[in-house]
Image (cartoon, rainbow, N blue to C red):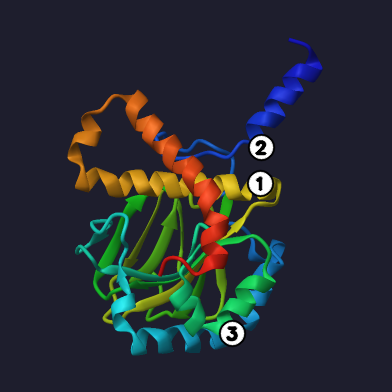
Amino acid sequence: MSTSTQTSTETNKITQPWYSVWGDRYNGNQPPFYNREDLPWTKVMEDNWELMRDELLQLIEDKPDRLQPYFINKTMAFPPRQWKTMGLYFWRYKIHRNCRRCPETLKIIKSIKHISSFSISVLEAGSNINPHQGDTDAIIRCHLGLVVPGELPDLGFQVGSKIKTWEVGKCLPFCDAITHTAWNHTKKRRIIINFDVVRPEFIHKKNRICAHVLASSGIQMLYPKFPSLKNKSGYWRKTIYHLIRVMTLILLPVQRISGIGK
């Protein structure tokens, strides 16, 4: 293999997103935590955290039923159903009714290019989020502390071997692909904003990345309803996955502007 061909192959590997859909372990080169000072959009979020907190918490108070256990896997937390979320964006799928109730927060989201997901995340007192890895390394996931009822060791967040905790009004960016876990052993709720920003080298693939992850989420939600799918060959499971992915890629832009969906 020529030097130029080898370099091209190595570059292609680096610029291809990793996905967890088939259960592979992440072995990429991203750090567990990123430096927030290197990410200009963290300042925008930190400068506006109180405005977003007030709007989001008011919505939860007015519409408590919109805060639901993490819907893809409700056993992700222990005790079960103690990790709850309410979204405005989910991999570019827009939850219109929540966006309508949070107009100022929506303006801030739109001011930061390439946000793909945005939600409020509640971890109830005395509970844990089980170790898991995210869907892809194509995004930088970031937590923004709203209500932080303690500090280490009672309240913490571990990514790989690194452990940190949240701070009120401060961003905590990390690599979602690396196995991570969280715990709240205090007597009060921990509340954060959870959002994703597409990494610069993958911006041109943003829609395809979101379609991949939405298809993966769809497959995960189908398994409990149709257990026989797990017994299907890899060919059939991949066929279903790619069918969902292509349909999502086509329909997602329409959903975002049409008001279809919640």
Q: Which residue is mark 3?
A: 104
Q: Mark 1 vs mark 3: which is more N-terminal?
A: 3
Residue 144 to residue 218: above or below: below
Please, what is the three-letter code of the amino acid marked with disc 2? Thr
Q: Could you say whether the residue bearing mark 1 is in a helix, strand or loop? A: helix
> Quadrant of the image for the C terminus?
bottom left
Please, what is the three-letter code of the amino acid marked with disc 3? Glu
Is the residue under label 1 in contact with that under label 2 (CB below 8 Å)?
yes
Q: Mark 2 vs mark 1: which is more N-terminal?
A: 2
Q: Which residue is mark 2?
A: 15
Q: Which residue is mark 1?
A: 202
Q: Could you say whether the residue bearing mark 3 is in a helix, strand or loop? A: helix
Q: CA distance from mark 1 to mark 3?
A: 28 Å
Q: Is residue 78 left or right of residue 170?
A: left
**Residues packed near mark 2 inside 10 Å, few (<14), some (14 to 19) or many (20 plus):** few
> Quadrant of the image for the N terminus?
top right
Q: Mark 3 vs mark 2: which is more N-terminal?
A: 2
Of residue 250 and residue 59, the one placed in the foreground of this image is 250
